[in-house]
Structure formats: C-alpha cells, structure tokens
Image (spheres, rainbow, N blue to C red):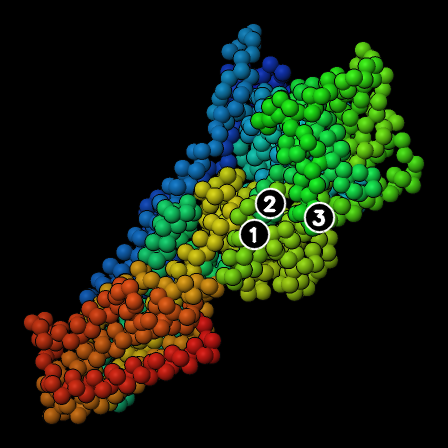
Amino acid sequence: MPETSEAEESGLTAPGPAALVPSAAPSRGGTAVTGGALRELTSLQVLRALDSGPRGLTDGDAAQRLAVFGENTLPARRTVSWAGRFLRSLRDPFTGVLLCLGLVSAAVAAWGTACVITVLVVVSCVLRSAGEYRADRSMAGLRELVATTATVLRRADDEAAPVARELPVDELVPGDVVRLGPGDLVPADVRLLRANNLSVNQAALTGESAPVVKHPVDVPNRPVSGTPVSGVPGYERSEAGPAGSGAPGDRAAGGGTPESGPFGAPQLCFQGSSVMAGSGTAVVVATGAHTRFAAAHDAVPPRGRSAFDRSVHGISWILIRFMLLTPPLVLMANAALRGRGLETLPFAVAVAVGLTPEMLPVIVTTCLARGASLLARAHGVIVRRLPALHDLGAVDVLCLDKTGTLTQDRPVVVRALDVDGREDPEVLRWAAVNAWWTLQLADLPVPDALDEAILDAADAGGGGSGAADGTDGTDAVGLVAVGHDGGGHDGGGHEAFDYDGIAAVPFDPARRLSTAVVRTPGRLGVHTLVVKGAVENVLERCALDEAERRRLLALAASRADDGLRLLAVATAERPARQRPYTPADERGLTFTGFVALREELVPSASGALRVLADRGVTVKVLTGDHPGTVARACRDLGLDPGEVCTADRIDRLTDRELAELADRTTVFARCTPEHKARIVTTLRAAGHTTGFLGDGVNDLPALHAADIGICPRDAVDVARESAGVVLADHGKDLTAIDHAITAGRHSSVTIATYLRITLSSNLGNVIAMLAAGLLLPFLPMLPVQALVQNLCFDAAQLTFSYDRVAPAALSRPTMLRPRDFLRFITAFGALNAVADLATFAVLAFTLRGPGGADDEALFHSGWFTENLLTQALVMVLLRTGRRAAEASGGFGASGGFGARGVSPVGRAAAALAVTGLLLPLSPLGPPLGMMVLPGVYYLLLVVVLGLYAVALAVARRRYEKRGARV
C-alpha cells in the first residue's frame, strides 16, 4: 500500500484494487486514495477510485477482494492455550523463587523437599490458569452480544439488479455499499453517498457524547466543523448535532471539545460509532486493520507494571536476598565453629526453604480466584487478570469521565426563562410546539434527545427542576405532550394540538435551528412561525438592536458558565399562504426566551461517591466537557469540584507541576485522550494506585496508563480487551466498582495477613536454627523434620484464603509495601526467635545427658512441638479477625474465635497445635527421629508460650498505636 503522511494522520485509507490487489490477481483499475483525499474528492470520484458504484459490488468482486483484504475484523486476538497460560504463570516472581529452591534441593538430593515444592508450583499455576480461562470465556460471551451483521447492496453479476442483504460484518470489503439506519453500528470506515437527517454517536472514538450530524459533501475543500462561535463564551460552532434538534450543533456548556481531523468530516463515518437517528447509504473505504478504530488500538503503548507487580517484585527481592544469604552463613558458621563441611548443605537448604512462604503462590491465586468468582456471580463483574483484583484493593485514586458515570447522557429541562431571565412557562410551551410539530411534519425517524426532554418537561406540567440549582421549580405549562413517535407520548390533551400544524423546516447544520409553522384556532388568516435553536443563530434572526442582542448573549453565557445548556425560542406571525416555507422566512422574529437544560444525573452516583470517599478512594473527573457542565454535575452529586483545571493549562505544566496540581484538583475539563493518559501517569508516578473507568477507543491510552483499567460491558471491544475488570451487568455504575474494590481489599488483606504471619514466624525459626547450629554439637532439626513442620504449617495456612475479614479492614486501600513488611517481620521474627531460644533453655534443663542419642531425639521432638504451637499462636493473635480494627497492617482483636463461632483460621490453628503435641507420641514419631517428651517439659513449655502470647499482645498494641501499616 502506498504510504503517505496524510494517510497516517487520518488512520483511514480507501485504496483502489490496483493499489492493494497483488500483482498475481486480476485488477480492474483504480488508484489509491488517502484519508486526506477522501475529504477532498467527490462521492463519484471515491467510487471510481474504489472501482465500485452506487449499485454495489458483484458477488465475484466481493469474493476476490475478501481474499485480498481479509476479513473485516481487528487483528486476530491470539487465543492463549492452556499450556501458554501455565507457562505464563511460571513468570510470577514468587513462583520463580520456589523453582530455584526446588532446583537447589534436587541438586543436594533433598528429593522430598524438591517434590513438595514442585507440587506447590503446579497447583498454583493451575489455579491461576483456570481463573484466567474462566474470565476469558466470560469475555467471549460478551463479544457474542455485539451485533455482527450489516445491510449490504450486492449483485449476482454485472447485469443483475442490486439486492439488500444482511451479511456478517466480517465479510465487508472496500467498495461495498451499505445502508445505515437508527441503532446500527457503523460496520467499517465509510464515505456517505446519501443521508437523510443522519446523526452518529462517535463517543467511542472521540469521547464526545453529543451526536454528530453526517451528510454527503461533494464540494472539495469544504470547511469542517470546529470554528468557535463569537460572542458567546462556552459555545462552539459545530455541525455536530442530532437530527431534529433545536440546537443540535450547539455545544453550550458541555458539548465537549470541537471535532477535528477526520472525525470532524461530515461525509465520513467510522467503525466503532453508532447511528442515533436518520438513515444513509455509504461506500466502505477501509476495513479490518486499516480502519481508524484499529489504528487507535495499535497506537496504544504497552502497559507498565501494575501495583501488584511492583509489590510482588519488591517482596520477592527481600526474600531472595534472605535466601541467598542464609545457606552460606549456615555453612560458614558450622565450618568455622564445628568443623562441619558439606554434610550440612541439606540442612542449609532446609533453612532457606524454611524462610520461604512456600504456599504464597497457592494462597495468592486462591484468594484472587475466589474473590473473582464471587464478584462474577454476585455482582456481574469480570476480573480478566487475577492480579487486577489486588490492584482494585490498592486503588486510592479513581479517574472517570462524567458521561454515563455521573450523568446519563440524557438532557432534562431545568427551567424556561423570559428575556429578563425570569421563569416563564410560556417559553416552554412554544418550545414544545416546535418540538412536536417538527417531529410530526418533518418525518424524522425518532425525536432528538433535546426535543424529548422538552416534551417530557411539558408532560410533567412544569419547567423542570428548578430546585436542582437552588431555585424554585415553577410550572412551565399545563401541557400534556403525547404521542410523538419516539417518546411514548399520546395525542390526547396535548396543547400542541390546540394548533394546526402547517409546515416544518427541519434542522440543518448550517442554520443550527428548526422551525415549525402552526395555525392558532380562532385566528384565521395567520400562521405562527415557532423557531428553536442555538442562541446566537436565533438571535441573529430576531428584530433586536445590537445592545439588546449583546445583553441576551451575555445572559446566555452566564447560564452556560453555570453548567446549563440553553436553547433560544422565538416566534413570528405571518399572513397565511399556500407557498412552502423556507429558511428565508426566518427573519424579523420576536424573541421569546430560553429553555435551560442539564444532563440527567445517575441516581446511584451520589451515594456511590460518598461510599468511595468513606473507603479512602479519591474520585477525579477527567472529561472533554465544558468546565461549567462538569462542575455543576459534581456539585449536584455532592462532590466538591473545587477549581476546575482545563486542558490548555495542563499543556503549560511540567510533569512535576502537573503532579502537584493533580493531587489537589478534582475536575479536569476539555481533556483529550492524551491529557487523560498524562494525568493518570502523573498520579501513578506520585505514588498513587490509580484506576481508570473508560469505554471508548479514546480511553485506551488512559486505560493502559492506569494500574487498573475498568470498562462496562458495552464498551468497544478493544477497550474490553485492554481493561483488567469488566462491569458486565451494571454499565459504568460506581456501585459495582465499590463492590469490586471491596472484593479486592478482602483478597489483599488476606494475602497481607498470610505474609505477615508466615514471614515473621519463618524468620524467627531461621534465627533460632542458626543459633542452635552454633551452640549444639548436633543439628537442631533434621531436614525431614523441617520439611514435615513446613508442610503442617503450610496446610494450616491454606485456610487464610477463606478467612473472614473485618469491615474496618476494608475501610482504606490495601497495599503490599515491601519496606513495611521488612520492618514487621524483623520485629516479630526477633520476638519469635526469643521464644525459641527460651525453649532451648527449657530443653537444656530437661535433658539429663548432653551428647547422647536420646538427647538429640528429645531436643528435636521438643523444638518441633514448640515450633508448631508458637506458629498456631501467631496465626490466632496476628490475623486480621472479624472484629479487627485495622486494614492491612494492624491486628484482629478477636483472634481466631469470634462470637459467631470458630473461624477457619482458628480451626486450622487448633489442628496445628494438636499435631504438634501428638505427632511425637504417635507411631510416626520414631521414623521422623522423634520420641515421647517428659511431662516437666510440657509444664515449662506452657510458661514459655504464655509469656510469648503476652509479648505478642503487647507488641501488637504498640504497633497499632503507632498506626503502622503493612
């Protein structure tokens, strides 16, 4: 394909067969057409370049092009096999640590240890692979819900008449002629040939929520939209707007940034957009990987390391350092002090294994998989990558757009104002007359959202909810609007039926207004023109002096800055006539007033924002909308917008300045996708764990930049593939996100509790082993005994995956912080080592003949029992219990036994203690090198354990008072 800068800039190509068909294939002519040329050529020239025509392609031509261009799909997703998932799971740092220890164990012929480690690694990888497979299967189910057909004109041969067929979207090729209707997804990048009041929603591509009017353009170099309207701050001239709207092109206070580049070209529609109203016929100019949709996806940079990745990496390196240091220390100490050589190597490896939390991969995977499964079943939230659940629990900043999350992308009438800015129900009555009769007489397929809001307000008999912005809601009209085709209103009793509809001049992008001509009963010979549209366009058609026009523009601007969207209404009386009415009759109007609208708020958003704030999550709104619109929505929902920052200010800031600004700013307006991604990246660099909620191609950069990307089920396919979490049942509902964050914190608290208990206990044992190895003439514990002890402790710790977590533990973000873990395990590990050394003293007092074989067996048995009992105590006293007062770093007040019965961890701790007491007495004791202990040992051990429990409780309280967190 020829490459041009224009084509790269637009992301859109419309190549002719000569340019794209391989030389071996027959060509019927045609030339390459770049994205820039598509906006300059006429429709006929584009058809010729594509070697097509208004009648569409023949079946033979289509088949040939399909073989050349391939299916109209995004570049194929590579389905990961089970083996691939398993191997990918091995890259987890914790799993890598275990594999290294397994290899070392095998190297020193410690086959039992090597086999146990191998089993743990396999179980962990299988669990993780199964969880991700279930998530991918759910995602495949969501993809099947997307429409997959398009209406295409095809001919059997050159002589046959074209027939409209419903064909799979993936069979479309450049040159196909397709028909578009309300509700259709645009199946490829297309150039319009004909259109009837066609409006398209391009939010998935641009983030702009307002529908965009599309129509054929056959005049080269026609200016595209985006020129600011002078005189009214907060307004922009645009050809974007829905058919039939009173001011479809008006983006007052919240219409978003102007359309630019190829998306602003009215004659082009793009894959990923959808038809809101009207109909059209278009020729396909790009499919598959050559569409703008695919180009946006390919341009997204690789995802950086998430919060989970960073935490795991830090903790893994702490463990690696300890494990690399331990065996050489054991070997050197024994060689220097006891003259022992390589015979102590198995013991040194056992010490390193004892330090390692072998069950960590299994427990991490089990916790995350269980949380993901519960989320999917109970709340319809799909976790695509298991580590994403931890990232949700760590989120302390959630970035989101306004539309669909805080507001419903549906306008509602706030009030109707007269020329002096006072409430006037008569203005809404005239606006409803215009909306009703324009819809009826202009033969529009569905009412525009603005007209729908006006008729709904008229239905309610009032001028909207004035109380929403601090004023009384005054009834606007006693008018029942019924029966318009799209809104479920019915004709009886509507005051618009007090008028006879005569004619309508529908909206078009140039005029940015619509006109209904009606006859008032009892007034023969008079027609009334009712005009509704963009403020400036209506005012320039009214009989006003310049001073009055400027006053009204200033009044409109002040309302726009307050977050309202204004439509102007004017009327004029003309002598009745038979001649058709045209835009030329829209002159000398009498200005009536304004209709003020705002976007409907999401009912659950206010409560969800409060809950998120209570949970320590800061919400930041990143939107392309007008500052006044988003600030008003935030205030109405109880979220203080503070000082709104606009994109032009962001462009002037360095990363450091932006970090300081982002930390204290709640609302960023007029943002492009690049601005959103930069803000998210800056927040992450400042130490925040950041989530981003988005649903369009324009959100891809920010979704990738965030620690955790979140999207709704109706998001574009590439956004769903990029996100770590998909809200399958709730759209962009903040309540569902709160459920997901809670589940993430539950899993993170459980993992943190396991790490805290295991690492501190293991470190204490390692210190005691090193000390005993230097003080005793024999090994303090046989390798097989260390292995059995680790297996018992590991089995008991599996219950952490099913532990109950205190509500208070879920009240703030959870994060696995390596430095805090290091401080914790050092302090409590030293305390555990003191208990072990005290046990050594008890054993020394109990033993009668140092140096004998019985002495070794007694020592091994006594320390084995004490180890399991202290580990059971730690599980009970340091866990995050059901009534715990901490989140991720404190401790539970209830231990393992609560008012509702014994928890799984409490039962496991009891079983571990029983095992420690009975195993030396059982038939398995002698084969393991253990024997029955004297009764005095148990009495002294009770004293040691009691003192250890008291010391743990005191240390726990001091730790909590300092507010330490893990």
Q: What whole-number distance in Å separates the C-alpha atoms at marks 2 and 1?
A: 9 Å
Figure quadrant of the C terminus: bottom left
Q: Amino acid at mark 2?
A: Leu
Contact flag, marks 1 and 3 (Cβ < 8 Å) = no
Q: What whole-number distance in Å separates the C-alpha atoms at marks 1 and 3?
A: 20 Å
Which is closer to the viewer, label 2 or label 3? 3
Crowding around mark 2 (Cα neighbors within 10 Å: few <14, some 14 to 19, many 20+) is many
Residue at 64% x, 38% y: name it: 411
Residue at 87% x, 43% y: name it: 551
Toward the viewer: 26 or 329?
A: 329
Residue position for label 1: 606
Report helix, strand or loop for mark 1. helix
Contact flag, marks 2 and 1 (Cβ < 8 Å) = yes
Circle number at residue 471: 3
Circle number at residue 58: none
Residue 644, image quadrant: bottom right
